[in-house]
Structure formats: C-alpha cells, structure tokens
Image (cartoon, helix red, strand yellow):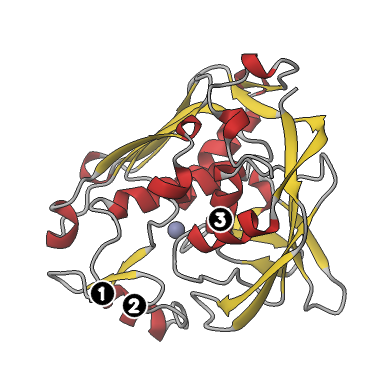
Amino acid sequence: MLQQRTIKTLTQAVGVGLHSGQRVELTLRPAQPDTGIVFRRVDLPEPVDMPVSPAAVVDTRMASTLGSGDARIHTVEHVMSACAGLGIDNLYIDVTAEEIPILDGSSASFVFLLQSAGIALQNAPKRFLKVKRPVEVRQGDGDNLKWARLDPYHGFKLRFEIDFAHPAVDSTGQVYEFDLGSGNYSRDIARARTFGFTKDVEMLRANGLALGGGLDNAIVMDDYKVLNSDGLRYDDEFVKHKILDAIGDMQVAGHPLLAAYTSFKGGHALNNKLLRALLADETAYDIVTFEDEKQAPAGFAQLAPAW
Ligand SMILES: [Zn+2]
C-alpha cells in the first residue's frame, strides 16, 4: 500500500513575514492519518484552525492567503510546496502571526525542516485527487491572456511558461517542465526564490506591503538587472519559482493531484480558480488510493524516503 506521511517530531523556525515584516514563529507538528494539512494561528485568544481547501483561500493578490472568520494566514504556498515535494499528507503548521515566515524566499528551508524532523509512514492509504478530464481556466485576452489547465496524467507534472519583458528575465529560460516523480524536487525546484522589481517594491511599501522583503529573501531587479550580489541560484530561477508556487497552490486541493498541470503566465489567482473549477465538477475527478505500490505513479513511493 502507498502510505500517508507525516513527520516524526515537531520542528520550529523563526523568521519574518514578507509583507508584514513581523517576527513570526513557525512550528511544524505531526498529525494523524487523514488530518490533511492544517494551519493554525496560535497567537489569537482562541487558536484558529485552517484546514487547507480551495474554498479556504480568501485572497490571491500577492500570495495565497487562507482565511477563517476574521483570521488570516498569508503566503502559505512555499511551505505547501515543500509538503507536496516530500509527499507529506498530514501536518499541523502553527504560526504566531498572520503570515508564514518568508525565510530565504524559496521552499528550501521548509524542505530542510521537514527532512530534519524525519518523515514517518502512516498506516493509512495515501489518497490522490485523480483528474479524469481536462479542466482549463482563462483570464484576459490578446497580449493579456493567461491560462492554467489540468489534464489527466498518471503522476504529477507541471509545465510553466512566463513572458516577462525584462532584460534579466528574458535572457533566461522562460519555460520549464518538471515531473514530481523524478524525485528531484529538492535539487531542481526548492531553491528557486520569489522575485520582484524595485519599482513595485516601492509601491508595495507605500501600501504597507513587502515590509519584510529584501535581498535576503527575494531576487530583486531594477529596470535592467538582478541586484543580488551573488546572482541567480539557477539559470532559470524565475520560471522554476513559478513551478514551486504552482506545486504549493495545487496541494491546497487537500490531496496530491494526479494530473499534468500547464500554465501560461498564471499565478496564485488562476491556480485557485483552476482548483475550484476542478472540484465544482464531480465528473472531472476521483479520489484514488494504491493498495499495490507498483500501480502508483513511478517515483512516488520514493519521494522523501522515511528513515
Ligand atoms: Zn512564491
């Protein structure tokens, strides 16, 4: 049987929120089978739980934000991406502020935390959300057209294309394809950082956003070049970060997807719209398990081997 996974012990990190600039403590804790991934605000008078689901995503303007009542947790996508990359099904993610710490702007620190805690196999079959027929969402038209799409696939692979007319970006690869079953998430995707432009940062700060952002946790560009003194971590770090984000945004479905994801210039908003469109059509998906590991997609049993 392909089993569900959690972590063996709790693990903690401290950082700042990208937008709020606030100090935030993050604690990752093991969870029982079929718990799913549950975010929790532990700083409120009554702790508020936020189990992930597409409907719980209440804002996608700068990052993916979960909400429950008045409580919010911003920027959940990088830690969600790390969970997907390591095949984690069940986890509590406690935070002491309304934002996940940005750490180095990628998911590498979350991968490190999860692996340091150790991956535990659980006595319950891992449930996948299997896409049965194509689902597509679009926004804009002409030069402003953006779209995202899911097609049936026995595994989880992604193809992302960006189209930034910027000298530092358009000289790099703007299309990337990644198959999670390759087992190369930590090496090829996790280290890709979020990116931004100085002219946007000034505007965002004037609006009380990106207060925690800087060269330590983002690729920052002026009109011509990358300002980080050590340059890029991957030649095609920009599009790889979009893949990292998409993996995290798709994990919000509640179960790992069996699908081929494709996006042209998409982002958090389209990703969430895509999941909502998928789940709105009961004929478009099934929940499946693999009693026989050999029937599971290649590589999935080896994601983050337990030790
Ligand atoms: Zn991101």
Instruction: Give the residue type at disc 3.
Output: Val
Q: Residue at x 65, y 66 (%)?
A: 73
Vertical comparison of 22 with 240: above or below: below
Along the line of sight, the residue nearer the viewer: 78 or 208: 78
Q: How far apart are marks 2 and 3 (CA)?
A: 21 Å
256 sits to left or right of 179: right
Along the line of sight, the residue nearer the viewer: 116 or 231: 116
Q: x, y percentage for residue 43?
A: 77, 78
**Which disc number belongs to residue 41?**
none
**Ligand 1 quadrant?**
bottom left
User: Helix or strand or loop: what does disc 3 sit on?
Assistant: helix
Which picture quadrant has residue 204?
bottom left
166 sits to left or right of 211: left
CB-based contact (under 8 Å), mark 2 and mark 1: yes
Instruction: Give the residue type at disc 1.
Output: Asn
Mark 1 lies on residue: 228
175 sits to left or right of 46: left
User: Helix or strand or loop: what does disc 1 sit on?
Assistant: loop
Instruction: Give the residue type at disc 2.
Output: Leu
The label nearer to you, 3 versus 1, is 3
248 sits to left or right of 293: left
Along the line of sight, the residue nearer the viewer: 58 or 95: 95
Along the line of sight, the residue nearer the viewer: 14 or 261: 14
Q: How crowded is mark 1: few (under 14 residues within 10 Å), some or many (20 or more)?
A: some
- Which quadrant of the rendered structure holds the C terminus? top right
Q: Residue at x 50, y 76 (%)?
A: 19
**Which disc number belongs to residue 111?**
3
Q: x, y percentage for residue 52?
A: 70, 50
**Which disc number belongs to residue 215?**
2
Vertical comparison of 307 with 302: above or below: below
